[in-house]
Image (spheres, rainbow, N blue to C red):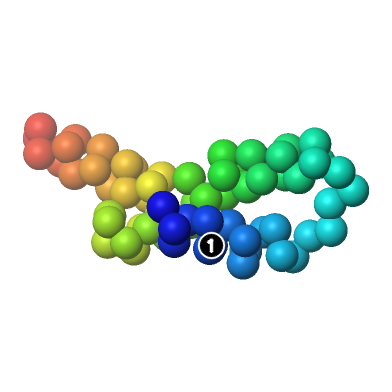
Amino acid sequence: MERFFLNLKMERVWQRDYANHSEAMTDIADYIACFYNPVRLHSAPGYQSPVEHEQRAEHDSLIGRI
């Protein structure tokens, strides 16, 4: 969890100048939902994005059925 918050600060918060708390909350939620979760590479699935990992798993599953 500490690594997530460090990444959040380095990749987003420290790069922006928010006008108010609401703007910051909206931007951070967007970062998490649109970049960190689906796109950013994660170490657990072999340094793939979660989307790539799911696509590969689905592909491998379909290949296994043939």
Name the residue: 58% across, 57% down: 8
Seen in the image, is 59 located left or right of residue 31?
Answer: left
Quadrant of the image occupied by residue 62: top left
Quadrant of the image occupied by residue 17: bottom right
Name the residue: 52% across, 56% down: 5
Which amino acid type is shown beneath numbered disc 1? Asn
Name the residue: 38% across, 47% down: 50
Q: Position of residue 49 (x, y in %)?
A: 41, 53
Seen in the image, is 5 located left or right of residue 18?
Answer: left
Residue denoted by label 1: 7
Name the residue: 41% across, 52% down: 1
Q: Position of residue 34 (x, y in %)?
A: 59, 43
Front residue (pair 47, 56):
47
Q: Position of residue 9 (x, y in %)?
A: 62, 61
The C terminus is located in which quarter? top left
* In the depicted structure, whether residue 19 falls above or below residue 66: below
Quadrant of the image occupied by residue 32: top right
Outermost residue, right side: 19
Crowd class of label 1 (few under 14; some 14 to 19; many from 20; radius 10 Å): few
Q: Position of residue 59 (x, y in %)?
A: 25, 42
Identify the element where label 1 is drawn. Answer: helix
Outermost residue, top side: 65
Seen in the image, is 27 located left or right of residue 59?
Answer: right
Front residue (pair 55, 8):
8
